[in-house]
Amino acid sequence: MMRSLNQILTLVKKDLLLELRQQYTFYGILLYVASTIFVIYLSMGQPEDTVWNGLFWITQLFICVNAVAKSFLQESRGRMLYFYSISGAKNFILAKLAFNLLLMLCLSLVSLLVFCGLLGNPLQHTLSFIGIVCLGGTGLSLVFTFLASVAAKAQQQAALMAIMGFPIIIPQLLLLMKISTTAFADVLQSGQLQMILLLCGLDVLIVLLAVILFPFLWKD
């Protein structure tokens, strides 16, 4: 158990060091976040609560696609074989899931800050919404990391991620929008806890699917 955990942490550290060495990719994503929200601000100004909420989660979706799409592009066939020999498929995919989760959490909080700065802050329960943003960013990153691992084998990563990802992510995105509406109301709605537990269950399901299915893709 400890050996697997050390291997996962080492692989996460490797991805972090690569990200620090290739800072232009991270800054490129940040520029994409800022420019997207700025264009929304120019076209919408400061919209009402429901529009603000919908625009935020749609922005999160496309930020996640752009951030996670490169997960497996930088891994050559020889490097993948090397990782297979030293860590195994399960540890490798868990490390990818963990790294992209941390990356998406960072980008989600940055986008929320820019959103509130440009489009106003209509939130009544800011801390509650931040928690929902972290939960939503976690779910989005897990789904698209798993899809990126599948699409990378077909050498058509961007196209396959869009084809497979959007039908899968739409129910989760609608659920996130519904949960986050409670942060705009003075009174908390009933049933929020059940929806949050459902989202957590979906996240656990994605992790289990990745751990079970990715070794079969690795052998190909």
Image (tube, rainbow, N blue to C red):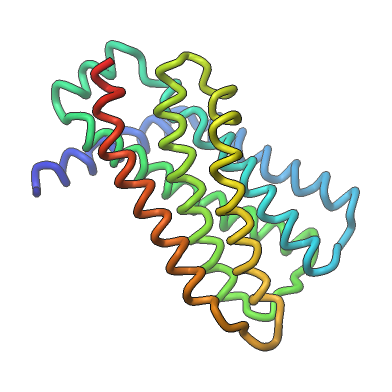
Q: Is residue 1 depicted above or below 113 in this figure?
A: above
- Point out the image quarter for the C terminus: top left
Q: Among all residues in the image, which is located at the extreme bottom?
A: 187
Q: Quadrant of residue 44?
A: bottom right
Q: Is residue 143 depicted above or below 124 in this figure?
A: above
At horizontal 84% and vertical 67% (from top left) the residue drawn is: 48
Q: Quadrant of residue 123?
A: bottom right
- Residue 113 in picture, x, y percent from top left: 65, 60
- Residue 77 in picture, x, y percent from top left: 32, 12
Q: Quadrant of residue 50?
A: bottom right
The image shows a total of numbered marks equal to: 0
Q: Among all residues in the image, which is located at the extreme top?
A: 78
Front position in the image: 98 or 158 = 158
- Residue 71 in picture, x, y percent from top left: 44, 30
At horizontal 40% and vertical 18% (from top left) the residue drawn is: 153
At horizontal 71% and vertical 76% (from top left) the residue drawn is: 184
Left/right of residue 39 with respect to residue 150 in the rendered view? right
- Residue 216 in picture, x, y percent from top left: 26, 25
Front position in the image: 110 or 57 = 57
The answer to whether residue 13 is seen in the rendering is no
Q: Is residue 81 depicted above or below 96 in this figure?
A: above
The answer to whether residue 74 is seen in the rendering is yes
At horizontal 27% and vertical 39% (from top left) the residue drawn is: 211
